[in-house]
Image (cartoon, helix red, strand yellow):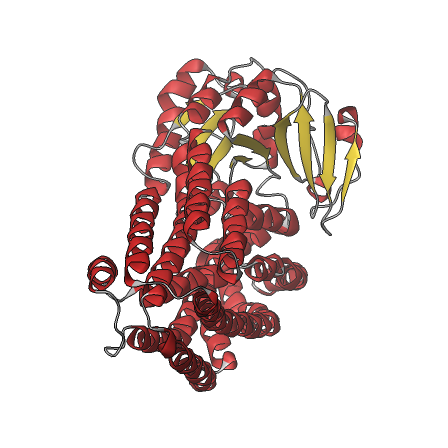
Amino acid sequence: MDILKDFNQRIQKADELVTSVLPTGEVLNDLSLKKDEASKTLERNKEVKIPFIGDFSAGKSSLLNAFMGVDLLPTNLTPETAVSYQLYYDTREHLVIVRGDGSTEEAPVDAIKSLKLTPNDMVNVYVNNDKIRELNARGIVLVDMPGIDSGIEAHNNAITKYLQEGTIFVIVADAEQGTLRNSAISFIREIKQYSLSAAVLINKADKKSQSDMQQNILPHITDQAKRYIGEGTFVGVTSASTKETGAVSIILNDVDVESAIKQRCSGAVNGYINDDITAVQTRITIINTGKDEYAEKLEQLKNGRDKALRKLKELDENAQPVADSAQDILDDVSNALNARSSSLANLLFSSNNNMNMFNAELLNIIRPVMLNAFKRELTEYSTVIGGAVQGFAVDVNDILADKNNKPLDYAKEMAGNMFGGKALENMLNAGMKKLMERWAEKKGLVTLLGCLSKVIGPVATIIVNLIPDILSFIFGKSREEKVEEIRAKLSSGVFDRIVEGLRPQVVQMLAEQRTNAMSEAEKLVNEEIKNFDAAIEQAQNEQEKNAQEREVETGKLVQTVQELQALLIA
């Protein structure tokens, strides 16, 4: 794709620029590692996943089979064997099963309907199909998802895998139902909290008369889509039986792959280029510093580092205790559950002891609350310890901008006007921002969300056993009174058990994330001192340059910075 080619070219050009002006050594080695990290980010985000979501009866797999024109994806699965199927093009048709433990195994494509699978697994399907080839060429990968009413584990695993990929979800509704069911509406409410978008397909149109479809079902579901997703939401009509899949093509043709990739990757590309700019700026400062000042400045820098590391530990010790932060998160969960207690009670009353829908609804409520609460707590913590890093940045700027330093007037004018003496401070602040964003998105957070099934599963079993007793106890009362009894039972006991079941995992995750945050902040401070140390050592080892030589090199370095700045993505 053009945008990936452009981003890779920017990274490569930046690498060529800094390699041409900086001496071989530790600084370039560090920049090379950062270049590799940016390139890996591009590789990881080269695809836009489009998950097809719906209840088991909605016909998602049959619709995708009709779209491809081949009977490939399995249908009529049970919740226990439902997994995600990702569709890729290959002339050699085969399957790659990715197990829950990360291991993989290959199988022939005709074995797809007889695979032994668990909800923790995923299957990459490689098929020689022109439509899949065209979509893959654009960077689009279709995903056939488990039913959102398929039970707690399959649903939770599917959501946690795709919720951070910024994709569009295609909600497949059953025309025979004539409406978006509660499961779909709950799912939509959740993905809206992640700022993800959705489109709607009304499938099995052949099961209803054309007049009923056009006069009743389509207007009703379109109105639901506008209310729950937003104005302008696409709603199309499809039928796997009659091969009516044009609406699928409309959705896919409208996907802006390049914008999605730009949103995901521009930060990594700009981050690497800014690291290059900082390294060149540092070189400008150092080559225009008298050699007799190197040792003194390096000592000052190391003292500044030690001061910052001490400050980090002090701030960590004075931060809100982990147990208190965990309680804040669990209070959010408890409040969210109680706010939805009436709807949960109604759902439970109507479920006839079928817990799949109830479990899925619990997850729809808890998962976004947990994600947002964790990000809030980690951001607050990282802001506290980030103060030490920012103080270090100011100290270093003061050291490097020492008024006793006697750089050439030409260099001072050019470097000063361009960078304002804030190069390192800006870099460190940008580094802290990147760390803060990354801390809340580490693998551990998804792992935490994945563990919800282990907590809610046993609680759901308890509820199944409680409901008959509740209903028998309130025999003879109205439906409203029975629902209220169930609601009171949930609020007075069940919700507390869910919250307490989450507590150990929440505390553990917060402690791990704080440890990671401290480690990354210390690494940021140490790495920058190491880079300055290496840059100064390089300058010390060079032959003494006269004023004219330094002026020439400074001019080249300034020009390089200008060229690097031109590579930044707007």
Q: Position of residue 320 (x, y in %)?
A: 44, 82
Q: Is residue 338 visible?
A: no
- Side of 493 relative to 91 (left or right): left
User: Which of the pair 496/474 is nearer the observer?
Assistant: 496
Q: Position of residue 281 (x, y in %)?
A: 34, 60
The answer to which image quadrant residue 143 occupies is top right
Which residue is pictured at 28% across the width and 52% down the height? 555
Q: Is residue 129 visible?
A: yes
User: Which of the pair 453/566 is nearer the observer?
Assistant: 566
Which residue is pictured at 57% across the width and 57% down the height? 446
Is 283 placed above or below 53 here? below
Quarter of the image for the C terminus: give it.
top left
Q: Position of residue 352 (x, y in %)?
A: 62, 49
Is 328 placed above or below 94 here? below
Which residue is pictured at 42% across the width and 71% down the height? 382
User: Which of the pair 565/485 is nearer the observer?
Assistant: 565
Which residue is pictured at 48% across the width and 60% down the height? 27
Is 180 placed above or below 535 here? above
Is 184 placed above or below 213 here? below
- Side of 317 relative to 501 (left or right): left
Q: Position of residue 373 (x, y in %)?
A: 44, 65
User: How many numbered dots are placed on residues in this image?
Assistant: 0
